[in-house]
Image (cartoon, rainbow, N blue to C red):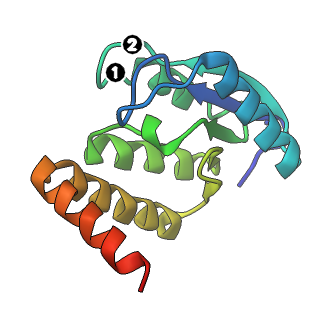
């Protein structure tokens, strides 16, 4: 249930390294702005998360805005909270307010619990890969190279 007084999607970007990569803030803004333009969404300037690892203070502030906006456009899924409980809280708050979460880089839209469950499957794979040793990664890369040609 979207209220008539809601307008636009608040951008959310990061100022720290996520998943061993960093993107300048002006590029993050550009990506989100172009994503919204392509989707026909009204883009509201982005809030930038603090640099401290695992910090979600700014995301929490954006979630507090949900009564006044249509949803959030996040630069990348790498900005999702690391904690599954925190992600579940984010989904719940979005759905309770009838809002939508767009993830610009990965072109993902989370509108409901099914979409959130799909996202959690992606996070499960990410966590499994993160916990693997570098030896396992090397083995998998070599196996992939050998079998990609066949």
In the foreground, 22 or 10: 22
What mark, if any, has residue 51 been given in the picture?
2
Circle 2 residues within 10 Å: few <14, some 14–19, many ≥20: few
**Label 1: element kind:** loop
Please state which of residues 64 and 55 is positioned toward the viewer in this rendering.
Answer: 55
Residue pushed farthest bottom? 150
- The residue depicted at 21 percent of the width and 56 percent of the height is 137
Q: Quadrant of residue 25?
A: top right
> Circles 1 and 2: CB distance less than 8 Å?
yes
Q: Secondary structure at mark 2?
A: loop
Q: State the image coordinates of residue 82 (x, y, percent, origin top left).
A: 30, 39
Name the residue furthest top: 51
Provide residue 81's location: percent of width, then percent of height.
Answer: 36, 37
Q: Is residue 32 left or right of residue 149?
A: right
Which quarter of the rendering shows the C terminus? bottom left
Residue at the image point whose x is 45% and y is 26% from the top: 60
The residue that mark 1 highlights is 55
Q: CA distance from mark 1 to mark 2?
A: 7 Å
Return the mark for residue 100. Answer: none
Q: Establish if 7 lies above or below 139.
A: above
Residue 116, image x, y percentages: 46, 60
**Residue occupying image coordinates x 54% and y 27%:** 64
Q: Which part of the image, by quadrant, shows the N terminus?
A: bottom right
> Where does the image place residue 98, in percent across and percent down from the top left?
64, 51
Q: Is residue 71 left or right of residue 6?
A: left
Eyeballing the image, is 142 above or below 101? below
């Amino acid at each position: 249930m979207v209220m008539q007084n809601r307008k636009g999607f608040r951008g959310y970007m990061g100022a720290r390294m996520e998943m061993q990569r960093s993107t300048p803030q002006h590029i993050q803004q550009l990506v989100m702005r172009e994503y919204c333009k392509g989707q026909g969404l009204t883009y509201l300037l982005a809030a930038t998360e603090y640099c401290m690892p695992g910090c979600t203070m700014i995301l929490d502030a954006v979630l507090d805005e949900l009564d006044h906006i249509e949803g959030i456009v996040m630069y990348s899924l790498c900005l999702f909270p690391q904690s599954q409980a925190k992600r579940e809280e984010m989904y719940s708050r979005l759905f309770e307010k009838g809002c939508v979460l767009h993830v610009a880089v990965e072109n993902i839209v989370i509108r409901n619990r099914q979409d959130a469950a799909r996202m959690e499957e992606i996070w499960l794979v990410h966590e499994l890969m993160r916990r693997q040793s570098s030896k396992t990664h090397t083995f998998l890369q070599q196996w992939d190279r050998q079998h990609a040609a066949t």
